[in-house]
Amino acid sequence: MPEVEGAAVPAQSKGSWSSFLKSIASFNGDLSSLTAPAFILSTQSLVEFSAYWTENTSLWIAPTQEPDEAKRALLVMKWLLNTLKQQYCSRSEKLGSEKKPLNPFLGELFLGSWDDEFGKTSLVSEQVSHHPPVTAYTITNEKYRIQLQGYNAQKASFSRTIHVKQIGHALLTLYPPGSDVPETYLITLPALHIESLIYGAPFVELGKFIHIVSSTGYISKIDFAGRGWVSGKKNSFTAQLWKDGHGSEKNPLYTADGQWSDTFTLKQGEGKKAKEIETFSPSNIKLSRINVAPIEEQDVFESRKAWANVARSIEKGDMDATSHFKSRIENAQRALRKKEQEEKREWQRVFFSQADSSHTAEVIFQGLVQKISGLGVNSWEGVAPEKTAGVWRYDEHKAKTATKPFHPEGLIALGENSDGTSAPISRISTNQSGVPS
Ligand code: HC3
């Protein structure tokens, strides 16, 4: 890690980096409003981040093969611990630091699938709200009858560095072997903060804790700590798993500890009497690569197609072209919002709808929410509809009828011809108020 302030910042960007740091110190909590220097911009949009959840397919589907319910709950915790490296470290490891992702626009989609020895696992990720920014996703493997869905927003604040609270939750539904009764796991999302900002090489550290609460009565708690706590190693954690009414955080069935980004150990029991079950390195777990349609075949609302010009300009380091193509998307979005207002209608999400509270799955979900409240987690904002523009669920009926183009009315606004080719830039020149004329 660099030891001198700004050491990792390219010479030509020192000025813009220090302006960026000053702007962070006074920002309003909206991460999308931050204007960062070119060298720290990512070409990847946040809608793509949903894919990190299940790149470790073998671990994700493992609980569906386990007949013992306590061991199933442990396998769910093991899978989750193993996703953290991908979710929170992979970009820093690949790119040298955490970059600023592209802010998804309303309706942006990331569609793909993993095709491996476990069959087909499909991902649908959609930006369901822009103010506040909310991404919803669902990941399904029909062969193993398992589904993960969830949605998340971020609330940021500044105190010495950027602190981010995640609002939302994930729900894992699976069928135990030979059973037609699904079980559900409600997963809360970790708080995080950015380390090493001052050196120009930011990376993510997790903080506080998360829970996994299951409809079978098992509860896992994972406590995160950065460097300097217990072991003094970065990305440290301790975890306990117990059955509600038959144990507690202090008297758990299983425990785990170590570094979520490096090596950690699962144990039976707790403390000095604990028996080691397995030691892991997430980097030794085989990851599957997601397949995404070639850009020419993507819908104009699919992320990589929509951002292609912006991404190319960032790669070339051409900031003028980057701003130009970003404005094109922003203007198109403004035009769509204006049209909706005029026609008094709301933007139609392609794959997600508001949760129906009378649905059995929602009744089970509410029971799990109650259980979390019973754990004394007062600050949990996993279900805060006013902060996430609602409670979002994958809508199978909508998904069955979804066809391309997903938003015919959005084609022209995005500067596309109906055959999917790009319209000349002059067609979307803006008037004084920034709205395409
Ligand atoms: C905070 C974050 C955007 C949000 C990212 C989330 C929380 C999104 C949901 C995923 O499931 C998990 C996840 C992982 C990383 C989080 C990003 C890390 C950095 C990024 C900030 C907006 C960037 C701040 C700018 C800079 C230059 C300091 O990196």
Image (cartoon, rainbow, N blue to C red):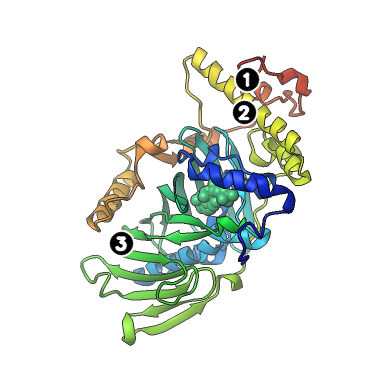
Query: How many other residues sit within 10 Å of disc 2, few (<14), some (14-19) or many (≥20)?
Result: some
Q: Which mark is residue 46?
A: none
Quarter of the figure with the C terminus: top right
**Which amino acid, mark 1?**
Gly
Q: Earlier in the sequence, mark 3 or mark 1?
A: 3
Q: Work out whether 427 lies above or below 36.
A: above
Label 3 – label 2 distance at C-alpha: 46 Å
Q: Nearer the viewer, mark 2 or mark 1?
A: 1
Label 2 – label 1 distance at C-alpha: 9 Å
The answer to which of 190 and 234 lies nearer the viewer is: 234
Residue 406 is situated, as x and y percent measured from the top left of the image, at 61, 30
Does ligand 1 reach within 8 Å of label 3's beta carbon? no
In the displayed structure, does residue 314 sit left or right of residue 354? right
Q: Quadrant of residue 275?
A: bottom left
The answer to which of 257 and 176 lies nearer the viewer is: 257
Q: Which residue is mark 1?
A: 434
The reply to whether dot 2 and dot 1 touch (C-beta < 8 Å) is yes
Judged from the image, the secondary structure of the residue bearing numbered disc 3 is: loop
Q: Which residue is mark 2?
A: 330
Q: Which mark is residue 216?
A: 3
**Which amino acid, mark 2?**
Glu
Instruction: Say whether residue 68 is visible.
Output: no
